[in-house]
Image: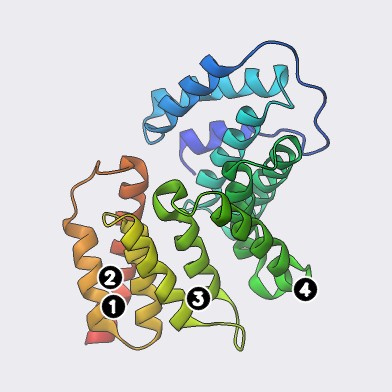
Amino acid sequence: MNSITAALLVLFAVDGGPAKDSPSGGTSAVVSRLDSLYQHRDDPAAWAEQQKLAQTALAQAPRDYGVLWRAARVYFWLSDDPAVDADQRSKWGKQGWDLAEQAIAVNAGDVSGHYFAAVCMGNYALGLGIMRALSQGLEGKFKERLKRAGELDARYQHGGVSVAWGRFYDKLPWPKRDRKKAQQYEREAMQINPASLRARVFLASSLLDDDHPKEAKLLLDEVAAAPVGRYDAPEEQRAKGMAASLMTKVQDKLK
């Protein structure tokens, strides 16, 4: 665990219980700064400043919609880290999910709360184990949140709704798994955002599992060759790391 992640673990140990009334006064300047810092979330100095701002904002405005979903977004990024172990992924995913649900309770008409509830829930399920997650009834909850996010803004997070649907159908156990549908969603994400690297990685993963390593390699080659900074540099860098890890499996399959 790196120093940035460790510091965030301490900072974002917030209560997932019911939020209290929001204080008077706007938080637009704070959330604007949080958004700016989030675009540089792979930089230690930016994360350090974001820690202080987010901690203060959550304490002072625990029912502020913009603060709540942005805190959930931080938990998503943490729980999405491929280097995080399953237990920590599940813990952070649940904390992000709880905050996103609080955001929805404040404002159910905006996409951000629904989207981050779904993707944090997804990471919680991956860390917990898919079979255990299904036994808790998470499938219906996930689909409800992600469906609503798509209804509100199908293009949100550079096609992230379609990316999440694709991963969902790819990771379900048989007989619920539907790789054809998963691959359709990842291709849809690439239509929404032609530069999407994560959609390519997830599509490559699905194709590899479908015994199409050559097609998977072509997609991963595209990811490796892609310049960074076309839509979200930290996200693009993370996707490149995921692609490099997957490429070793592809090369083994091609031998």
Label 2 close to label 1 by CB (< 8 Å): yes
Residue 74's disc is none
The residue carrying mark 3 is 170
Mark nearer the viewer, 2 or 4: 4
Q: Could you tell me how far apart the alpha carbons at marks 2 and 4 are, in whole angstroms?
A: 33 Å
What amino acid type is highlighted by mark number 1? Val
Classed neighbour count for the residue bearing mark 1: other residues with Cα under 10 Å, few (<14), some (14–19), many (≥20): many
Label 1 close to label 4 by CB (< 8 Å): no
Residue 135's disc is 4
Q: Earlier in the sequence, mark 2 or mark 4?
A: 4
Q: Earlier in the sequence, mark 1 or mark 4?
A: 4
Callout 1 secondary element: helix
| Quarter the C terminus occupies | bottom left
Callout 2 secondary element: helix
Residue 250's disc is 1
The residue carrying mark 2 is 247
Callout 4 secondary element: helix
Q: Could you tell me how far apart the alpha carbons at marks 2 and 3 are, in whole angstroms?
A: 18 Å
Q: Earlier in the sequence, mark 3 or mark 4?
A: 4
What amino acid type is highlighted by mark number 3? Asp
Camera-side residue: 225 or 160? 160
Residue 204's place in the image compared with 198, above or below, is: below
